[in-house]
Image: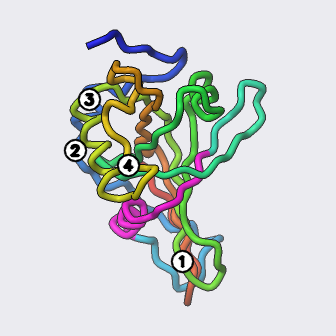
Amino acid sequence: MASRRRRRGVKEVSDRTQRMTAKEPAAALDQPFSSDDATATPWADARQQLEKAEVYWLSTVRPDGRPHVTPLVSVWMDDSLYFVTGNSERKADNLAQNSHCIITTGCNTLSEGLDLVVEGDAAMVSDPAVLKRVSEKFGAKYDSPFRFKVPDFAAYGEGGKNLVYQVAPKRAFAYGRGAQYSATRYRF
């Protein structure tokens, strides 16, 4: 296989991260931002929403310190969110300088829904087996143009231009709306 190009400042996914087993984070209700009778949103509910959401928003930091936010598609796999970007896009340049990021998803109504915020570090994925599984997940979830094939990925070494990133949550938040409002914090 051709040598893999590594972007400066981007962390590679470690073997340890790839072998991590599912573990439930500690959840706590943030009472000042929740209804009196609210309960913490179970992580299983938040995880299910991360799995089925179609549109996500990625927040990164530009090299000059200004924020950058962009919509994207993503898949949940191995207790992490995975997304794909072109190697010359703003988000790839930002992550090359600073891997800290936030991915959000949810809805835009006040009367119902669950908004999610995932904080973590974006790590570039280069393991061929993981790239294959990411490709399969995207193919099962999305229609064209978001059905990526492994040769589309730059790390595969056959001329692909797309970078694949993994964001394992370090912290996450769920904001529930409806009959009651709830703000839940998850620590991993």
Q: Which mark is in front, 4 or 3?
A: 4
> Hey, what amino acid is under mark 1?
Gly
Image marks 4 and 2: residues in contact by CB distance under 8 Å: no
Q: Give the residue at x 64% y 38%.
A: 60
Q: What amino acid type is highlighted by mark number 3? A: Arg
In space, the residues marked 2 and 1 are separated at their CA atoms by: 29 Å
Residues at circles 4 and 3 in contact by the CB criterion of under 8 Å: no
Which marked residue is nearer to the observer: mark 1 or mark 3? 1
Using the image, determine if residue 67 lies above or below residue 63: below
What residue does disc 2 label?
A: 21
Write down the residue under mark 3.
Answer: 16
The answer to the question of whether label 2 and label 3 lie on touching residues, with beta carbons closer than 8 A, is no
Name which residue lies at 32% across and 24% down.
Answer: 156
Range of residues picked out in magenta:
42-58
User: What is the x, y in percent for residue 42?
Assistant: 38, 69
* Residue 149, placed above or below residue 41: above
Nearer the camera: disc 4 or disc 2: 4
Of pointers 4 and 2, the one earlier in the residue sequence: 2
Q: Is the Cβ of the residue at disc 1 closer than 8 Å to that at disc 3?
A: no
Residue that appears at 31% across and 49% down: 77
